[in-house]
Image (cartoon, helix red, strand yellow):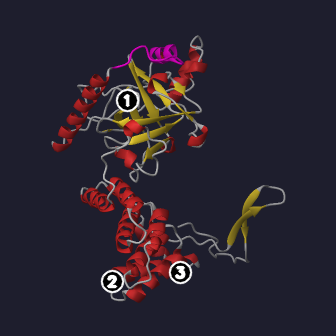
Amino acid sequence: MGLVQQANAELDVDEPVAAHPTLNNVDFGLQIGVEEILGDVDPDVSLEFLKKADAHAGKPPPTRVPRESLVSTHNSYVEQQQQSEQQNAPRMVKKVVLALSYPPSVKPVSDLSPMRLDELLVENHHEDRYLVLKTIAPPYMGAGTITIVEDEHGNTDKLVLYNQGSSTILQAVPEGSVILLKEPYYKFSGDDDFMLCVDHPSDAILLRHGPDDSLIPDGFKQTSQSEVAAEWKNAGDRAFISKNLPLAAANYSRALDLSSEDDTAFRVDVLLKRASINITVKRFDDALSDSLASRRGGPTDWKAYFVAGKAAYELTEFQASKQYFEAALEQKPEAVNIQKEYERCLARLEEERGHYDLAAMTVNVTPKNISIDRASFLSRTEVRDSPHHGRGLFATQDIKAGEMIFEIG
């Protein structure tokens, strides 16, 4: 997507951009069919635009913007965005034109073969292929994350990543990152404007130096990179202080990769820090795993049990959460915050038995908050196959008139 700003923008605006993975199958002599597609994609996308996209479909782009121009133009928009944020001005973002839905890549990387940027064909999903790219510019944050990438052969192009959650470093991919794209999609974005587009989060993989070295080209490997675990831990601390939690978690992961299994104190510290970050970014399974891995059978294990209790709570594993909080309180009985979380967990366990304070639940629901912190009551019902009508919901016990059947928290 070209980062063309419009002069009359008082709100978030951007140039129209089309993405259509089925353009090869469109008969542009059938205008009604095309208009139906326009309705499905975006009413502002013109028939002329789709015709241009179709004219390029299945072919290499007619022109390629030089590396210097790509980076210079991109960086100018990044600088404008940073200045706008400092001045609290309206933020210019790209307008997204959605393609018709297509499935994510489900093949393992081992079943794909590598390709180069100069092999990309317009409006094409490159099945059975993958790209390994390095970002050579800071990210431009809009509806998606836009950056400039190069391959190991020196070819460059634009890349946009959509739908990356706040828990992943790819949401604001730093300059110098190495990314693998599975079965990449290359789209027409306007006259002489083409770019790689990743709509499915799982189609983009951040490669880590060390664990993923077999996939990283030699030219992308950081030969001068520190191999000292403590330095990576410090880098994680700095990222945490700057509130870049995905980067902090990535740095802590590298510190653990490089640390000795015998350095117990170091590993416990890093595991707990990463577990706390995972709680914040809602990666509760990872938080539970990290916190339990940090236990060493000593008096400071209460920290691990406390984080494990919070993670299990968010996973609605309330009985396990209760046990973790009890283990934490056994070592730290005076901790008010642990006691508070423990009591909250006990309330959820009561609700799992069908004991609800319905009046309090009603008070907690407002026009701005329709989610309430409650457990589900499901013990009187189960889902199972029926003899003649597929699957259904069945009672597991006699239920009297007026009794609660089930409740979803």
Magenta residues span 48-65
- Spot the residue most to the right: 387
Which disc, if any, is residue 336?
2
Say which amino acid is labelled 1. Lys
Task: Give x and y (percent) for residue 8.
Answer: 24, 26
In the image, is residue 218 part of the stretch drawn in magenta? no
Going from N to C along the chain, the mark reached first, 2 or 3, is 2
- Residue at 36% x, 60% y is 255
Sequence-first disc among 2 and 1: 1
In the rendered image, residue 51 lying in the magenta stretch gets the answer: yes
Query: Which one is nearer the viewer's eye here, 335 or 354?
Result: 335
**Depth check, front residue: 196 or 255:** 255
Task: Measure the C-alpha gap from mark 3 to mark 1.
Answer: 54 Å
For the residues labelled 2 and 3, the Cα–Cα distance comes to 21 Å
Q: Nearer the viewer, mark 2 or mark 1?
A: 1
360 or 47: which is nearer to us?
47
Residue for badge 3: 350
